[in-house]
Image (tube, rainbow, N blue to C red):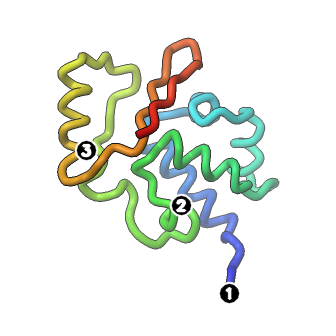
Amino acid sequence: MFTMINTKDFTIRLQKIIEFYGESASSFAEKIGVQRSSISHILSGRNKPSLEFILKILSSYPEVELYWLLNGKGSFPSENKTTKVAQNEPSSNSTIKNAINQAVDNKSIERIVIFYSDGTFRNFQN
């Protein structure tokens, strides 16, 4: 049986994600590719999150677990999968290589997405 998302609890989890990454509602909206008003309406309880909205969060923040986001089961951030990164922290090639090496222990890479400062991105799929 399918149960609807508890909007109030979802809002609390969404706020937790925004705060964990040190984002404002505006910067979070920009990062996931939605209008600022969408975030505002969901946080205020006026609108319920759409499937597209949820998928955009999961795409931009892969360490957020779907089941935790939808119903609070599991943990956030995913244990052993994430470290909080300072906003606008410059990264070097060695930092990126280290992150990839840590991420691929006994796993294959399915997809890599590179986001550029002008808002464009490149998607590399295995």
Q: Earlier in the sequence, mark 2 or mark 1?
A: 1
View extreme (bottom): residue: 1
Local SS, label 2:
helix
Q: Nearer the viewer, mark 2 or mark 1?
A: 1
Write down the residue under mark 1.
Answer: 1
Distance from disc 3 to disc 2, alpha carbons, whole Å, reads 22 Å
View extreme (right): residue: 46
Local SS, label 1:
loop
Is the residue 23 above or below the residue 114 in the image? below
In the picture, measured across the screen, residue 108 lies left or right of residue 61, that is left
Residue at figure coordinates x 26%, y 26% from the top left: 96
Q: Earlier in the sequence, mark 1 or mark 3?
A: 1
Residue 18, image x, y percentages: 52, 43
- Corner quadrant of residue 31: top right
In front here: 61 or 26? Answer: 61
Q: Residue 103 shows which numbered tag?
A: 3
Q: Earlier in the sequence, mark 3 or mark 2?
A: 2
In front here: 2 or 101? Answer: 101
Q: Nearer the viewer, mark 3 or mark 2?
A: 3
Residue at figure coordinates x 51%, y 14% from the top left: 117
For badge 2, the amino acid type reads Leu
Write down the residue under mark 2.
Answer: 69
In the picture, measured across the screen, residue 36 lies left or right of residue 89, that is right
Quarter of the rendering occupied by the C terminus = top left
Distance from disc 1 to disc 3, alpha carbons, whole Å, reads 35 Å
Residue 20, image x, y percentages: 42, 44
Residue at figure coordinates x 56%, y 71% from the top left: 71
